[in-house]
Amino acid sequence: MNPALNRIRYQTLIGTILTQFALGSVYTWSLFNAQLSHKLSEPVSQVAFAFGLLSLALAVASSMAGKLQERFGVRKVAIASGLLLGLGFYLTSHAGNLIMLYLCAGLLVGFADGAGYLMSLSNCVKWFPERKGLVSACAIGAYGLGSLGFKFINLALLSHFSLEATFQLWGLIAMAMVVAGALLMTDAPQQPAAAQTGGSHDFTLAEAMRQPQYWMLALMFLTVCMSGLYVIGVAKDIGESFVHLSAATAANAVAVIAVANLSGRLALGVLSDKMPRIRVITLAQIAALAGMLTLLFAPLSAGLFFAAIACVAFSFGGTITVYPSLVSDFFGLNNLTKNYGVIYLGFGIGSIVGSIVASLFGGFLATFHLILALLIVALLFSLTIRQPGAAQAKKEEFDAEPHLGKA
């Protein structure tokens, strides 16, 4: 690669990391539930539903990001994402009822976050076809670190300013970071087939969706997202209800999950450049299975509980890091944003299905049993799935070789 292009792709990487860090700030939402509940005179559970809507809107926007990038380019869409994010937080600061909160903090902020997240990630991965796993780890690791970094930023803001001013300042800081990152980004060039690991050609979204492998990958992704998001969301409650930990001890689950999640992103992301990515996903599924089996069937001590949720969080973090590159292995790089975008809807679906099952069938255990069954199916899929056209390509290669006995 010539020096000018090399400089552009590293600028894009820096811009993507900056943008991802700011977009990851939405995962500090739980810091605001209690104060919003007091302000709106509504139960915390109803206030917290805004984050479920945010996750769903994020996933839907991610599925549309490919079309937006195709029409406007990565820089313009990322700038618009940053401006909408700032507007969403500003309007949230003025929300006086649950409907306004759901519209502003849920749908608008979620849509803005999703439009920037998957598009900038996929574009960055396309710039580094030879190091897709490492680049995914850097970008998605920054997204995870954003929740940790903004935890301290938002707590500091809350300690010095009102709730309304905190939302406005949060929006201003996040918007400035996303826009600054966007200005460093450039659309990745089309990738020749030779640069793509294992894929014979680029599948359009319509072509990819006609392949059974596409839906196998989608179910595997949905399963790990459901397990990760559900356990992350209720870890403290599980510790208090199942393990009978004190509230202070159970709260340590948040730190355990954060460390395990980030470790999974970095470790499995780097590993995915050194071995087949589908085998990395198999390892992640085994880790999630171990965690879920422990939660369901082991006599839980504090140590076993923290180990179990760490396994689930490690699996979740690693899977969402490796998946963009895995989808590109199966269906090509050039249509990655669209092809991964529909699969990424599993993130939004997984974020609400676990809670719905728990509310309908009596709590944590029902969801855990569903997740366990899905993990077993997903593991079987990952062990048997083959890239589209792999068998045909081997047959053609065999036919093209000279064989003994042929005249």
Image (spheres, rainbow, N blue to C red):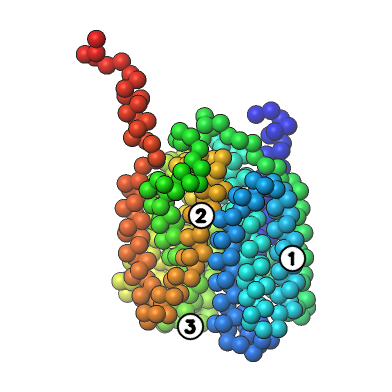
**Residue 165 x/y as whole percent:** 78, 76
Secondary element under disc 1, as helix, strand or loop, is helix
92 vs 271, left or right, is right
Residue at horizontal 41 percent and vertical 66 percent from the top = 308
Q: From the viewer's side, name the closer residue of 266 and 327.
A: 327
6 vs 299, left or right, is right
**Residue 170 x/y as whole percent:** 73, 68
Q: Amino acid at mark 3?
A: Ser
Distance between the alpha carbons at the discs numbered 1 and 3: 38 Å
Distance between the alpha carbons at the discs numbered 3 and 2: 41 Å
Quarter of the figure with the C terminus: top left
Tag 2: Cα neighbours inside 10 Å, few (<14), some, or many (≥20)? many
Q: Amino acid at mark 2?
A: Val
Say which residue label 2 marks: 342
Say which residue label 1 marks: 86
Secondary element under disc 2, as helix, strand or loop, is helix
Mark earlier in primary sequence (1, 3): 1
**Above-or-below relation of 396 to 144:** above
Distance between the alpha carbons at the discs numbered 2 and 1: 26 Å
Say which residue label 3 marks: 246
**Residue 113 x/y as whole percent:** 64, 61
Residue lying farthest left? 405
User: Which of the two marks, 2 or 1, is nearer to us in this view?
Assistant: 2
Mark earlier in primary sequence (3, 2): 3
* Camera sees residue 186: yes
319 vs 23, left or right, is left
